[in-house]
Image (cartoon, helix red, strand yellow):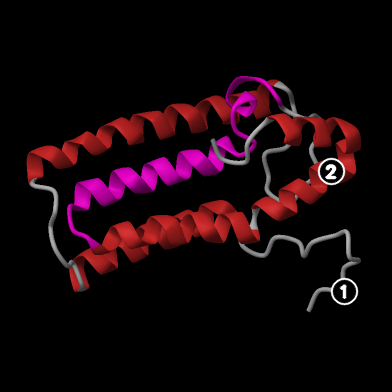
Amino acid sequence: MPEEQSANRVTPLRIVPPVYLLGAVVTMAALHVLLPGAKPLPLPWRWLGLIPLIGGLMLGGWSVWLFWNYKTTIKPGEASSRLLTTGPFHFSRNPICLAMVLVLIRLAAVLGSFTPWLVVPVFGWLIARNVIPVEESLLREAFSADYEQYKARTRRWI
């Protein structure tokens, strides 16, 4: 068990975002096979899911490139050496999380059945509850007033 945290600190990450993403993908596939429910999207329309996939991959790739370019850590739960506020971080404090949601939307659209769609908001909720607060706490500690100003002008998701 981790030691108790002060009131200003949150519990460190136990599960990193890619694990949540993998769990969501597996759950979506299982629901599609075992409990598909209605199939609201016929096959030709499912390919519209390419739009969020391309958007998600571009958003995620751009974000990862910025971490690399500014030589700061991308590892969840580690303190950053730089506060990123440009590129996709200008309009979202969590563009990589947003990119993962877009990828899940693509998967749900391709599967075409109803039940995989239920995983998308659950994934978003889990990330918002278990990952983002840890990251925000680390950024607040590292960049104090600069982070608070950034937080005041930039939305968490979009």
Number of marks in the image? 2
Q: Quadrant of the C terminus?
A: top right
Amino acid type shown at disc 1: Glu
**Can you give x and y, in whole percent of width and height, for residue 46 in the image?**
17, 42
Amino acid type shown at disc 2: Arg
- What residue lies at 89% left-to-right and 38% top-to-bottom? 144
Near-viewer residue (70 or 53): 53
**Circle 2: element type:** helix
Vertical side of 35 occupied by 131: above or below: above
Q: In this view, does 119 lie to the left or right of 44?
A: right
Q: In this view, does 21 lie to the left or right of 131?
A: left
Q: How crowded is mark 1: few (under 14 residues within 10 Å), some or many (20 or more)?
A: few
* Range shown magenta: 85-114
Vertical side of 20 occupied by 75: above or below: above
Near-viewer residue (46 or 121): 121
Mark drawn on residue 4: 1
**Circle 1: element type:** loop
The residue singled out by tag 2 in the image is: 140
Q: In this view, does 117 lie to the left or right of 135?
A: left
Q: Is residue 88 magenta?
A: yes
